[in-house]
């Protein structure tokens, strides 16, 4: 009987040890055999719903702004494919955050192989054809908070899971095989740490808390270059059977390279998702098109130094890096934060609270410069990260541009002061005015009254969403840097920056001449073109083309309207001017104009939330001989490159 008890104890211990292995034999064959599991919770099966009903169900379930797990059983059948390079969703209402928890069961939908737990094959070609994404599918995947990460599939049936990262080996080396611009440097490798960051150079032997970067004692003490989403000593935690996401706790890492030429489903969907999340989430990124992306997920991470029961006190967060090898953007997704500090930094052993919270930010290394994400980094309000950011409409998502300088792409409602950093794009404009400036910095409410002040001239702005407002740059009578400030609801101008004013000859060219006809005295026609999206995304609006003249005969330069070339022009991006139409115009009062400009704007300015928004396109300086020549007038023009003398 005693021998039987001893054998039973040995058997139980053996089962316990086997259960703790990172990869069991059952898991290793999971991709070879489909395992049917009962759905957990009240997840609704949409696989048999019509297309319209499926879309409506998603829309209705997205009102709740918490619980951001992916839904695995969404299906859109019968979508008409579009051959897209980047699908424009400007007219589609992107629903935001999913309350429905994900399941782990395999589904019969056409997207099950990519939305599940098994890493899909990059050679998947949609029955031999390159994959084509539909706008409905793009809307569906962008409505999920977390990006894909997989714990099954691949050569070792562990998907993106990094089983080599654990307490005894908290970091591993990764080669990019591409260039990642970061904080003024370029890297083709990184080291992935279990402790909530990736780094590019050696850290110091030990840290003192609170952390401070750059390290002042460099080069005596190493000053690491790193990107820290939650820089704190971590250990892999545990999860409960009732948790909605049963992917194993730990660190996940996946590189999606060469996105611009990929034809498989994961490559194309990753490219389009990243493209539009960044374009719509960060001002000034409207032309960004990623070449490479990296997805790193720290799932169910507990704090170092805690007691055994603290393994269930976990945080889950995710970093996405996207680059075209010129610009680099970082997306931080904070799904769940339940602890803030490890015991070495003063946190207690049960809840991970009470010490110095995690550092969040960026360090260039080598004693150069750093960016700490205030007020959250190393502060008690760190817990608010899951409810702030609002990038792409998601609480918990924060986006940064990180290639040369660190620029915050999302609003910050938790800081106050007299000189808060204002991010805006474009950062410069033509001194003649009319440039629409997009603004990020404070968090905006829909009914906020926005005032933009350029030096001493104030204009009214309009709120676009919680992360963005817009205003139209007025005319300047000087070039160079100008103070740029905004005020909300008549409060002091706290958010500030510097706007660069360019001369018409050096500003970005917006109206193009197809030949040199504008420099001739009697041209038969003058052809002009423009980018029609530079004015508005509404291509059905009517435009007007005007001619303006410039002169300096008084202390103050004078820009005067000369004539209307055409009214009611369709926004096709091209127009032909017939100079014969102006042969008999009597404009003697403008005979002293030295040179002029063509102007294109909206016939009827668009009203956006009660604010008149009328962008203006200006040509480079042009001679006016083609207009005044029939009157026998001579004029001189300097377009910044050549001095023209035209005599009658």
Image (cartoon, rainbow, N blue to C red):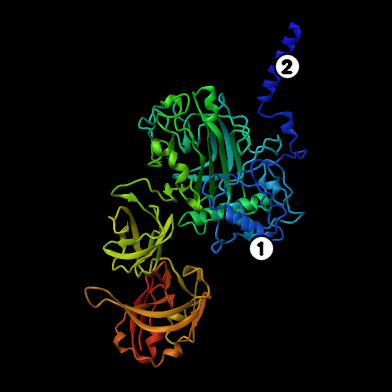
Give coordinates of residue 384: x percent, y percent. 43, 41
Give the percent coordinates (x, y) of residue 279: 51, 56
Return the disc, 1 or 2, that comes first in the chain's sequence: 2
Q: Quadrant of the C terminus?
A: bottom left
Q: Farthest front residue? A: 42
Determine the residue positioned at 73% across, 14% down.
8
Q: Is residue 129 above or below residue 5?
A: below
Cα distance between the residues tagged 1 and 2: 58 Å
Q: Which residue is mark 2?
A: 11
The answer to whether any part of residue 133 appears in the image is no
- Front in this rendered view, residue 545 or 374: 374
Query: Residue 31 at what x, y percent from top left?
Result: 74, 39
Q: Name the foreground residue: 227 vs 633.
A: 227
When the figure is inspected, residue 115 is found, relative to residue 313, above or below; the finding is below
CB under 8 Å between discs 1 and 2: no
**SS state under label 2:** helix
Q: Furthest-top residue in view?
A: 2
> Outermost residue, left direction?
555
Q: Does residue 114 appear anywhere in the picture?
A: yes
Which quarter of the figure has residue 520?
A: bottom left
Going 27% across and 74% down the picture, which residue do you hit?
A: 557
Res 598 → quadrant = bottom left
Q: Is residue 313 left or right of residue 14?
A: left
Position in image of residue 579 (x %, y %): 45, 87
**What residue do we see at 55% from left, 44% from top?**
67
Residue 508's disc is none
Mark 2 packing: few (<14 Cα in 10 Å), some, or many (20+)? Answer: few
Q: Is residue 201 above or below residue 97?
A: above
As drawn, 458 above or below 549: above
Please tell me whether mark 1 or mark 2 is closer to you in this view. 2
Residue with the mark numbered 1:
82
């Amino acid at each position: 009987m005693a021998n039987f008890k001893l054998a039973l104890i040995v058997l139980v211990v053996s089962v316990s040890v086997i259960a703790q292995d990172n990869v069991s034999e059952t898991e290793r064959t999971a991709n070879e055999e489909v395992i049917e599991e009962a759905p957990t919770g009240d997840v609704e099966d949409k696989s048999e719903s019509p297309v319209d009903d499926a879309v409506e169900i998603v829309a209705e379930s997205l009102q709740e702004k918490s619980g951001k797990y992916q839904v695995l059983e969404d299906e859109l059948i019968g979508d008409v494919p579009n051959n897209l390079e980047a699908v424009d969703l400007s007219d589609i209402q992107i629903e935001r955050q999913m309350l429905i928890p994900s399941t782990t069961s395999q589904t019969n939908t056409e997207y099950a192989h990519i939305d599940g737990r098994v890493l899909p094959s990059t050679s998947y070609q949609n029955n031999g054809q390159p994959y084509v994404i539909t706008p409905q599918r793009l809307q569906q995947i962008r409505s999920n908070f977390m990006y894909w990460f997989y714990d099954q599939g691949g050569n070792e049936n562990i998907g993106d899971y990094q089983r080599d990262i654990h307490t005894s080996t908290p970091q591993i080396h990764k080669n990019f095989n591409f260039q990642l611009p970061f904080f003024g440097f370029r890297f083709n490798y990184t080291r992935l740490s279990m402790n909530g960051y990736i780094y590019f150079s050696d850290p110091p032997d030990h840290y003192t808390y609170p952390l401070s970067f750059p390290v002042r004692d460099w080069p005596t003490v190493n000053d690491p270059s790193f990107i820290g989403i939650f820089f704190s000593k971590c250990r892999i935690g545990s999860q409960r059977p009732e948790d909605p996401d049963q992917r194993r706790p730990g660190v996940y890492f996946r590189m999606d390279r060469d996105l611009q030429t990929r034809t498989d489903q994961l490559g194309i969907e990753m490219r389009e998702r990243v493209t539009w999340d960044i374009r719509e989430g960060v001002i000034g990124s409207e032309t960004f098109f990623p070449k490479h992306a990296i997805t790193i997920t720290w799932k169910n991470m507990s704090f170092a130094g805690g007691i055994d029961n603290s393994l269930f006190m976990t945080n889950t967060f995710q970093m996405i890096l996207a680059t075209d090898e010129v610009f680099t953007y970082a997306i931080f997704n904070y799904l769940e934060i339940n602890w803030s500090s490890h015991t070495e930094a003063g946190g207690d052993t049960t809840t991970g609270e009470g010490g110095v919270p995690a550092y969040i930010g960026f360090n260039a290394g080598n004693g150069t410069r750093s960016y700490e994400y205030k007020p959250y980094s190393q502060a008690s309000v760190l817990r608010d990260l899951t409810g702030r950011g609002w990038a792409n409409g998601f609480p918990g998502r924060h986006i940064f541009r990180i290639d040369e300088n660190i620029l915050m792409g999302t609003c910050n409602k938790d800081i106050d002061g007299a000189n808060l950093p204002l991010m805006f794009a474009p950062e410069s404009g033509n001194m003649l005015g009319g440039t629409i400036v997009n603004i990020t910095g404070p968090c905006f409410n829909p009914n906020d009254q926005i005032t933009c002040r350029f030096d001493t001239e104030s204009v009214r702005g309009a709120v676009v969403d919680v992360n963005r407002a817009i205003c139209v740059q007025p005319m300047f009578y000087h070039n160079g840097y100008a103070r740029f400030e905004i005020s909300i609801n008549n409060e002091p101008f706290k958010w500030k920056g510097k706007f660069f004013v360019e001369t018409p000859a050096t500003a970005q060219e917006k109206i193009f001449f197809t030949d040199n006809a504008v420099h001739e005295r009697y041209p038969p026609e003058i052809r002009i073109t423009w980018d029609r999206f530079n004015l508005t995304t509404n291509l059905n609006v009517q435009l007007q083309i005007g001619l303006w003249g410039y002169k300096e005969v008084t202390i103050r330069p004078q820009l005067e309207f000369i004539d209307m070339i055409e009214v009611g022009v369709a926004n096709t991006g091209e127009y032909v001017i017939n100079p014969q139409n102006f042969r008999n115009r009597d404009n003697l009062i403008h005979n002293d104009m030295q040179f002029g400009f063509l102007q294109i704007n909206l016939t009827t300015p668009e009203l956006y939330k009660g604010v008149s928004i009328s962008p203006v396109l200006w040509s480079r300086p042009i001679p006016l001989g083609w207009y005044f020549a029939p009157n026998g007038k001579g004029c001189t023009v300097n377009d910044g490159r050549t001095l023209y003398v035209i005599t009658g």
